[in-house]
């Protein structure tokens, strides 16, 4: 089965065996390595799943970056602290224009408040937009008026990564070729490689070569070993994909 913790660990082991370095997004901005993997995790729901990911990475001596939303479904202070103590980067997964119904003025105040609250727990140097696919607002538009670097933020992946040089893979839609059902998790890239399953990525790693620099985006709530949770997420995500394809994706 795909999208299990076992399959996730298999993917990491395959990347390690091919000699990739692993960096947090903050480390990559400050001192990018050659042949590097960036493990980005959007903690949209079920933060305990993200903690499971963080522990797997720690057991393999690699690090990732975890972006937490300022909503109760994501914001678990105990888990935020535990992930940080494992050596991973924690950042803010902002969705301020969705929560503030498109108001730039209210949105920046919401951003400031939530960023300050997260910084009371852990250092925060990078941020990343939450796509809010059912919302008509794109929170990246906040930066048409304001500048996140004024808040001692050094990077936002959608603005500060050259995806013509860094190959982007995201599990949006609970598939690796989910761009057709993605509302905002899209990047402009010259790479033409495409995968559908995690095993296809692993097989390519074993038998061929992948690009030297890769950013993976994971939504850990989609990855479960237990059959009941796995099935629930499978059904729920397929339903969401149909809705997004019909109503939102152009």
Image (cartoon, rainbow, N blue to C red):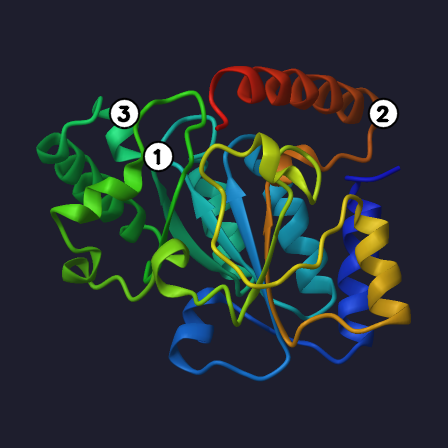
Quadrant the N terminus occupies: top right
Camera-side residue of 208 and 18: 208
On the rendered structure, is 100 left or right of 237?
left
Report the Cα–Cα distance between label 3 and label 2: 34 Å
- Say which residue appears at 29% left-offset and 26% top-offset: 98
Q: Are marks 3 and 1 in contact (CB under 8 Å)?
A: no
Q: Position of residue 104 (x, y in %)?
A: 13, 34
Q: Up-down: is 140 above or below 103?
A: below
Camera-side residue of 89 and 106: 106
Please give the label number shown on residue 70: 1
Where disc 3 sits, the SS reads: helix
Which of the two marks, 3 or 2, is nearer to us in this view?
3
* Residue matched to label 3: 99
- Say which label, 3 or 1, has the lower sequence index: 1
- Say which label, 1 or 2, has the lower sequence index: 1
- Say which residue appears at 29% left-offset and 66% top-offset: 154
Report the Cα–Cα distance between label 1 and label 2: 29 Å
> Label 1: how many residues lie within 10 Å, few (<14), some (14-19) or many (20+)?
many
Residue farthest to the left, as pictured: 105
Q: Quadrant of residue 48?
A: top right
* Residue matched to label 2: 227
Q: Position of residue 91 (x, y in %)?
A: 39, 53
Q: Are marks 3 and 2 in contact (CB under 8 Å)?
A: no
On the rendered structure, is 238 left or right of 45?
right
Which of the two marks, 3 or 1, is nearer to us in this view?
3
Q: Position of residue 88 (x, y in %)?
A: 52, 62
């Amino acid at each position: 089965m795909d999208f299990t913790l076992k399959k996730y660990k298999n993917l990491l082991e395959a990347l390690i065996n091919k000699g990739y370095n692993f960096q947090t997004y903050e480390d990559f901005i400050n001192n990018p390595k050659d042949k590097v993997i960036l493990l980005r995790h959007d903690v949209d729901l079920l933060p305990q799943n993200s903690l499971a990911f963080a522990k797997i990475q720690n057991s393999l001596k690699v690090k990732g970056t975890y972006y937490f939303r300022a909503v109760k479904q994501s914001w678990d202070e105990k888990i935020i602290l535990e992930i940080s103590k494992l050596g991973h980067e924690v950042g803010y997964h902002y969705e301020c224009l969705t929560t503030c119904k498109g108001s730039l003025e209210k949105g920046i105040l919401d951003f400031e408040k939530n960023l300050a609250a997260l910084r009371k727990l852990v250092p925060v140097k990078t941020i990343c937009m939450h796509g809010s696919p059912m919302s008509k607002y794109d929170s990246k538009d906040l930066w048409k008026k304001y500048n996140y670097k004024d808040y001692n933020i050094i990077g936002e992946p959608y603005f500060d990564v050259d995806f013509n040089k860094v190959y982007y893979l995201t599990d949006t839609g609970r598939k690796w070729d989910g761009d057709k059902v993605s509302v905002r998790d899209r990047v402009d890239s010259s790479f033409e490689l495409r995968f559908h399953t995690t095993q296809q990525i692993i097989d390519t790693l074993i038998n061929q070569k992948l690009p030297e620099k890769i950013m993976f985006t994971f939504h850990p709530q989609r990855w479960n070993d237990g059959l009941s949770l796995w099935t629930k997420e499978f059904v729920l995500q397929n339903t969401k994909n149909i809705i997004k394809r019909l109503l939102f994706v152009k």
